[in-house]
Image (tube, rainbow, N blue to C red):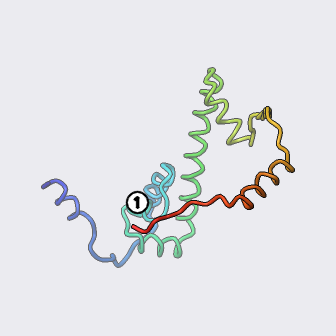
């Protein structure tokens, strides 16, 4: 329990006055975006409060570029892994590439056989008989 309590002391309690898009900060943003983090999670992983991160994005367009580059590189890396697995004979990886990258879907067959026949006139006669005979259920109060 002590370890958990100490982890919160390293988080900033108030907004820091100056946050700049330094090379180190941009690398942190890039690394977090490459792992697929977004929004507040990306901000915290990059060592900033969400409000600081939003302001930094507004002040410096390089932050958005670092996010885009990180996401692109992460996606490209995972696509390469899938393609390599597919080339090595992994059928599931090959199907995933076909479905998600190329919009492919397997052909589906629907085979329906109806054994009985439905007669509308018979159904109407049965409904009429129920109304005439007055099929009902009595419900007694509890």
Q: Nearer the viewer, residue 92 or 115?
A: 115
**Residue 118 image offset from top left, x and y in percent:** 82, 43
Image quarter hosting the N terminus: bottom left
Residue 40, located in which quarter of the rendered image?
A: bottom left
Figure check: 5 above or below 101: below
Residue 83, located in which quarter of the rendered image?
A: top right
Q: How many neighbours does mark 1 have within 10 angstroms: few (below 14), some (14-19), or many (20 or more)?
A: many
**Can you name the residue that lies furthest to the bottom here?**
17
Give the residue pinned by disc 1.
Answer: 46
Left or right? Give the position of 11 relative to 23: left
Tally of marks: 1
**Can you name the residue that lies furthest to the top here?**
89
**Residue 3 image offset from top left, x and y in percent:** 16, 53
Left or right? Give the position of 76 relative to 52: right
**Residue 72 image offset from top left, x and y in percent:** 60, 50
Q: Residue at x 41, y 73 (%)?
A: 52
Left or right? Give the position of 101 relative to 23: right
Please tell me whether mark 1 sits on a helix, a strand or a loop: loop
Figure check: 20 above or below 104: below
Q: Nearer the viewer, residue 125 or 14?
A: 125
**Residue 126 image offset from top left, x and y in percent:** 77, 51
Q: Residue at x 53, y 75 (%)?
A: 58
**Can you name the residue that lies furthest to the left here?**
2
Q: Nearer the viewer, residue 63 or 86?
A: 86
Q: Residue at x 61, y 30 (%)?
A: 93
Image quarter hosting the C terminus: bottom left
């Amino acid at each position: 329990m002590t370890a958990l309590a100490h982890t919160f002391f390293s988080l900033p309690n108030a907004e820091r006055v100056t946050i700049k898009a330094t090379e180190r900060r941009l690398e942190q943003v890039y690394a977090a975006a490459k792992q697929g983090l977004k929004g507040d999670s990306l901000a915290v992983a990059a060592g900033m409060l969400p409000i600081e991160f939003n302001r930094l994005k507004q002040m410096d367009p390089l932050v958005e570029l670092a996010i885009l580059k990180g996401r692109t590189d992460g996606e490209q890396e995972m696509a390469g892994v899938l393609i390599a697995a597919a080339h090595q004979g992994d059928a599931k990886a090959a199907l995933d590439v076909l479905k998600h990258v190329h919009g492919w879907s397997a052909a589906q067959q629907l085979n329906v056989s109806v054994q009985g026949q439905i007669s509308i006139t018979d159904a109407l006669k049965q409904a009429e008989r129920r109304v005439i005979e007055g099929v009902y259920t009595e419900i007694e109060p509890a």
